[in-house]
Amino acid sequence: MKPSDPVTALHRVGPAAARSLARLGISSVGDLLLHMPMRYEDRTRFVPLREVEIGQSCLVAGELVKSNFAYGRRRSLTATISDGAGFLTMRLFHFSRRQLEALRPGVWLRCFGEVRAGPAGREMVHPEYRVTPTRPDAPEPALTPVYPATDGFASARIRACVEQVLDADVTLDGSVLPGERIPSLDAAVLFLHRPPADATAEALGLARERVAKDELLAHHLLMRERQKLRARQSTTPLPRAQGLGRELLRSLGFRLTGAQRRVVSEVLNDLDSPAPMMRLLQGDVGSGKTVVAAFAAIRAAEHGCQTAIMAPTEILAEQHYETLSGWLSPLGIEVSLVTGRLAAGERRARLAQIACGEALVVAGTHALFQGSVEFASLALTIIDEQHRFGVHQRMQLRQKGDLPHQLVMTATPIPRTLTMALYADMDVSVIDELPPGRPAVHTSVVSSSRRPEVVDRLISACRTGRQAYWICTLIEASDSLDSQAAENVAKTLRDAASGLRIGLVHGRLSATERAQAMAGFKNGDVDVLVATTVVEVGVDVPNASLMVIDNPERLGLAQLHQLRGRIGRGRRQSDCILLFDPPISDIARARLGVMRETSDGFVIAEKDLELRGPGDILGTRQTGLQTFKVADLARDAALIPSVVEMGARLEAPVRRTIIDTWSPFFDDSYVEV
Ligand code: ADP
Ligand code: MG
């Protein structure tokens, strides 16, 4: 058996089991090896009944001295065992006739479960138990791992699968890292699945960290390798040409910030060189990334070359189209738009324009990289809100040209240490300055018991000409519940304030309806836009200066920050009200506190890492960072400097082994070359 074999290579794992495992991200034997226990149970010794403590989960054994079938409010079956010195009761609420008959005085019981205080002393309710005629066999030799499990595939079954893999001596053939307390990856993995009876929490933590480090290292090395590859490629350089950029500068109506000027020149410098650009542009919401993209597109256009700018939503693609045509059409650069909802005839006409090279800048959604879209000379691809796209989608777009330059933009502030390790394959530019004259958004955290007050406040603000967002947060699993919530809020507002113009944007509306509502809000015909988090990304309505977020406690900090970034874009003082539904956890409260205290995206990102408990998958996904199999960026960020340092001093063959060991486990966002 090899790590790359499918899980169905194991005994008793058929297609149905494979589907359950797939839900846990496990499809190969190697995935099982890297499916880490979340905790351990100690079944390595029988705890004397006299010593068991309330709250403790433990293994016990004893002879059954009395069983009792109790009727009453809740009928239950109890069996009291004794080991000569102490007693304990097992209580079952559900049981079969066979179970009932087997529990006769004189047999022995072996139970594992949590000890609770019962009506007649200490008891275990529905423990795992086994009945034997005599004293049971020796306990387990190793700690028992408990795995993250899924419906229909419990931890015990996963454990049995992992045991099969270990019994077959399958190894990852991983690296040996010099200077590590646990030199080999395989040793650390084995230790985690079969920890010796005396393994301490510290030793287990160390082993997990060793695996995490290997994974981060592999990723880092892969990124560096990719960067070297790229440096050897060559493409059409786009040197300074007609000076159309100067004309845009004059017509913009605002002066670029220092940060924008710096970043524009970094980008133009890259374009000047034959090595294809691969630059990540980070800039907080509202920092003005679009104009940077415009300067890059102008440079390509000056050479008669095309630029594709891809956005994750139609709303945003249309916004880019409008902004860019406003800026570029006066310079004689034709801008076009491709989304999924063009009428067939219109679509054909636009595609023809793109194929013959007449449209020099093309904004669009995913529709851009479909087979039917052909470019005459695509020299630059720009991806906005990159975390919304998989890398293979970026690749598909890139393949429309001959090694085009790439600019990927993100509003997700990524802490520096992480950028260093995770984006080692890209050059990074940061816009760390907001356009001047924008007062910070004032944020308050308000309990939903004061909802009517908030409604009143919003209504009176809108009566003075302000525009407001009301955001109904998305419960990932339930787009429709959210839409319902948005409809309810819209109704409340309509009922409470006649004459106020309310727009509605949610996932259940057609794209046309959504676009109409957005357009109405943008040009001031709508006072309040009630929306689900579909407005999160990139939407720019400078006159909007008030935002209410319903149930902000459901969202990660990164997403809250994104949402709030929709306001505070004009000169007016803006307000954000986080309307939470009590009770909320301490962590949730701390998160909202961070939102109130700061609007600096980088500070928020750091706090987010700090506050997120391990295993908070939601949080990781929301920040748009790569998720790893074992490493957890919240917990393991501190490992990164040593990962980078180790990456620099490893011998080439070791680097190769590490990359080869891990590459099969990296998802598609790694496979770009
Ligand atoms: P983001 O970085 O979030 O994509 P945008 O590019 O949408 O930000 O810019 C936000 C708003 O700020 C837009 O209305 C844009 O025209 C404006 N803007 C960009 N740069 C400047 C600047 N230097 N001075 C004033 N306004 C600017
Ligand atoms: Mg943007």
Image: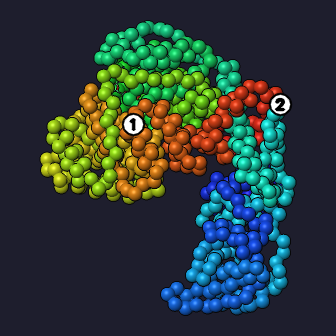
- The amino acid beneath tag 2 is Pro
Picture coordinates of residue 252, whole percent (x, y): 32, 17
Q: Earlier in the sequence, mark 2 or mark 1?
A: 1
Instruction: State whether residue 448 is above or below residue 460.
Output: below
The quadrant of the rendering that contains the N terminus is bottom right
| Crowding at mark 1 (Cα within 10 Å: few <14, some 14-19, many 20+) | few
Residue at image coords 64%, 53%: 25
Relative placement, left or right, of 212 versus 264 is right
Q: Relative to the observer, which residue lies in front, 485 or 120? A: 120
The amino acid pointed to by label 1 is Glu
Task: Name the residue that disc number 2 marks.
Answer: 653
- On the question of residue 567 being in view, the answer is yes
Q: Tags 2 and 1 in contact by the CB under 8 Å rule?
A: no
Q: Residue at x 51, y 18 (%)?
A: 267
Q: Position of residue 59 (x, y in %)?
A: 73, 70
- Judged left or right of residue 46, residue 274 is left
Residue shown at 52% from the left, 22% from the top: 429
Instruction: Report the Cα–Cα distance between label 2 and label 1.
Output: 49 Å
Q: Is residue 579 left or right of residue 647?
A: left
Above or below 235: residue 600: below
Quadrant in the rendering for residue 158 = bottom right
Q: Which mark is residue 5?
A: none
Q: What residue does disc 1 label?
A: 597
**Numbered disc in front, either 2 or 1:** 1
Where residue 396 sits: x, y (%)? 57, 35
